[in-house]
Image (cartoon, rainbow, N blue to C red):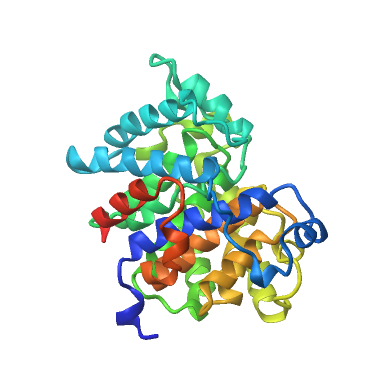
Amino acid sequence: MTATTVKKRAATGTLIGLALGDALGFPTEFNDVPSILAKCGPWREMELPERAFVSDDTQMTLALGHGLRTAMDRGLLGPLRLERPLREEFVNWYQSPENNRAPGRTCLTACNLLKDEGRLWQDASQIHSKGCGANMRVAPIGLAPGLSDEQRSGAAQLQSALTHGHPTALAASDLTAHAVRLLAQGAEPTGLIGLLRSYALDNRTRYQERWLGDLWTRSQDPSPEHFIARGWDECLAILDRLRDAVRTVSPETDPCLATGAGWIAEEALATGLLCFLLFVDEPVTALRRAACSSGDSDSIACLTGAFAGAYHGADAWPVEWADRIEYQSELVTLGALWD
């Protein structure tokens, strides 16, 4: 396919792909690969469940997307303008009866604290958590048009910091949004790891003070630069593992063995990217590979779907799958806004 055909409706492709990966991986999460194969049959033939329910990954992506849209409708995107609607959307998700999809403890703890309107968000942030809950939901920030590099990076890190304040969660969220952005703009997947490494090196000691305030002081780090560099260094290390894995890993083996099980932010990013890069021209196969993995299958497949959808656009996904995904109308409405 050429760059002109693959970019069609990249935002819709990203959001639908993310939700499809989530729904495909949700039933296999917490299972090892032999158990998944016993339950689902050959991994290359995995079918989307008839009732294609998603997890908190898609729910929180939608919450972030709605909060971002509200903030951008009010004017130039800045930290205060984004924090208010995001906080509101995250608390609404926390209190929703639909929040029954085995959400992560970090999100639940932080959102419970964010309910207190008098509390600084920095005091709600879970500074020691780098779970994948922040970068699994960040794709909308990579899709929203008209943002500067500083706004995109700051917004990606702020949305993470509302719940996951660990520097690796911040850096992995920033990198995930950047990867979605690059792929939606037509970057060649063969050069993607190099582009992400360059971005990480460029930002390694750049603490986004305008967006994060004094968050770093909740850690034991001697300076904001030291704090944020810890996160970028962990991401650089996993990108090196990813680069080796793309060259050496058999597509038939569990991807988690190469780049990690994905429960933590940098591993979810790397293993999601690995599945995408192993099957660049076969987006549905990439989703199936991600869902048939021994780790955090729904989050890994969710990220794989976001990357594949950003690169290929909405036509990547079978219509009979896309039509029955839970929250389909919300996902399509949000995607159309940014296409």
Question: In which quadrant is the C terminus drawn?
Answer: bottom left
* Extreme residue toward the bottom, this view: 2
**One can see residue 179 in this view:** no
Quarter holding the N terminus is bottom left
144 left or right, relative to 300: left
Q: Residue at x 18, y 37 (%)?
A: 74
Left or right of 318? Residue 67 is left
Residue 320 locus on image (x, y percent): 45, 63
Which residue is rendered at x = 54% and y = 57% of the image?
Answer: 21
Q: How many marks?
A: 0
**Furthest-front residue in this view:** 50
Q: Nearer the viewer, residue 137 or 285?
A: 285
Task: Tell me what residue is drawn at x 60 percent, y 49 percent.
Answer: 265
Image x and y of residue 22, in percent = 55, 52
Q: Give the vertical position of 195 relative to 26 (above or below).
A: below
The residue lying toward the viewer, choosing from 57 and 212, is 57
Left or right: residue 94 compared with residue 249 = left
Q: Image point 45% across, 22% down: which residue?
A: 114
Q: Position of residue 313 (x, y in %)?
A: 37, 69
